[in-house]
């Protein structure tokens, strides 16, 4: 599924427990996220949080925002069994 936010196109590459809600995302999404290759959205206490990640090969990537770290981030920093989704920026 293709989504357009801030004139950027994204693919919804993963959705766990029907997490993606365009209205929620569009309210929180700012130009800060435009630079990231991936956006993770997770719900804790029915509130959406967004976090950006880069492709591992991106020179802006560091240990805590590499795509390869995303699963560990979900395990450590997201509520257990929370609803979440992953958007990938289309180039």
Image: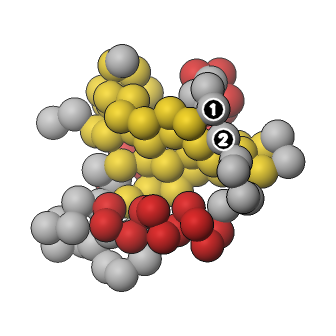
Residue positioned 59% across, 42% down in the render: 84
Task: Say which of 4 and 19 sits in front.
Answer: 19
Q: Residue furthest top?
A: 1
- 29 above or below 79? above
Q: Which residue is mark 1?
A: 17
SS of the residue at dot 2?
Answer: loop
Q: Residue 83's quadrant in the figure?
A: top right
Q: Position of residue 19 (x, y in %)?
A: 62, 32
Q: Describe residue 73's horizontal placement relative to residue 10 as left or right.
A: right
Q: CA distance from mark 1 to mark 2?
A: 5 Å
Q: Is residue 29 visible?
A: no
Residue positioned 32% across, 29% down in the render: 11
Task: Say which of 81 and 46 sits in front.
Answer: 81
Q: Residue 25's quadrant in the figure?
A: top right
Q: Position of residue 20 (x, y in %)?
A: 58, 28
Task: Say which of 5 and 71 sits in front.
Answer: 71
Say which quadrant the C terminus sits in.
Answer: top left
- 53 above or below 83? below
Q: Position of residue 5 (x, y in %)?
A: 43, 27
Instruction: Please say if the residues under marks 1 and 2 sit with CB atoms less than 8 Å apart.
Output: yes
Q: Describe residue 88's horizontal placement relative to residue 71 as left or right.
A: left
Q: Position of residue 74 (x, y in %)?
A: 56, 61
Q: Which residue is mark 2?
A: 83
Say which quadrant the N terminus sits in.
Answer: top left
Colouring chosen for the image of the structure: secondary structure
Which mark is first along the chain, 2 or 1?
1
Residue positioned 43% across, 77% down in the render: 64
């Amino acid at each position: 599924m293709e989504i357009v936010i801030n004139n950027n196109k994204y693919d919804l590459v993963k959705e766990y427990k029907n997490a993606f809600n365009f209205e929620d995302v569009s309210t929180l999404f700012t130009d800060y996220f435009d630079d990231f290759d991936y956006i993770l959205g997770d719900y804790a206490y029915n509130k959406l949080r967004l976090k950006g990640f880069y492709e591992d090969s991106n020179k802006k990537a560091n240990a805590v925002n590499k795509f390869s770290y995303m699963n560990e981030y979900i395990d450590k920093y997201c509520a257990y069994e929370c609803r979440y989704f992953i958007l990938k920026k289309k180039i």
